[in-house]
Amino acid sequence: MNADSVARALRGSFYRKNRLAFAAAALGSLLNAVLNLILSWLMQQLIDAAAGAPGALPFGGLVRA
């Protein structure tokens, strides 16, 4: 067996009967990406409010969010 066929066999055995785990991992990755974007936006708004940047959202409203 050459390395290509071994790699193909190993990849096939990994994905066989593993679709639910793959779907859960994909969903978890997407949710993690969305939460990271929300957190980075909120941190940006809090830093702008603390620095007194013009046009920043009010600090009290950000804390409640």
Image (spheres, grey):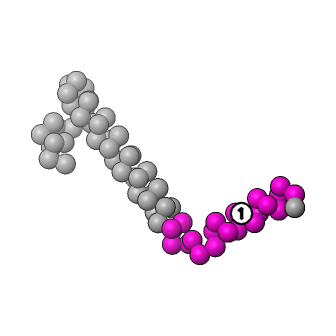
Q: Residue at x 34, y 47 (%)?
A: 38
Between residue 39 and residue 57, name the one nearer to us. 39
Magenta span contains residue 29: no
Q: Quadrant of residue 10?
A: bottom right
**Residue pushed farthest left?**
60
Near mark 1 (Cα within 10 A), the count class, few <14, some 14-19 or many ≥20, is: few
Query: Which residue corresponds to the image point at 63% horizontal and 68% vertical from the top-left?
Result: 15
Q: Residue at x 39, y 46 (%)?
A: 37
Residue 5 is a magenta residue: yes
What amino acid does circle 1 point to?
Leu
Read off the magenta span.
2-22
Magenta segment main secondary structure: helix
Q: How many marks?
A: 1
Of helix, strand and loop, which one carries label 1? helix
Q: Residue furthest right?
A: 1
Percent position (x, y) of residue 41? 33, 41
Residue at mark 1: 10
Q: Relative to 28, is 62 on the left or the right?
A: left
Front residue (pair 33, 52): 33
**Which of the image's four quarters has the N terminus?**
bottom right
Look at the picture and state if 37 lies above or below 45.
below
Please identify the residue farthest to the front as the structure is shown: 1
Determine which quarter of the picture holds residue 19.
bottom right
Depth check, front residue: 34 or 52: 34
Left or right placement of residue 32 versus residue 57 in this view: right
Compared across the picture, whether 2 is left or right of 58 comes to right
Q: Position of residue 45 (x, y in %)?
A: 27, 36
Residue 39 lies left or right of residue 10; in this view the side is: left
Residue 17 drawn at (x, y percent): 59, 75
On screen, 14 above or below 45? below
Residue 27, relative to residue 43: is it above or below? below
The residue sitting at 32% across, 44% down in the picture is 39
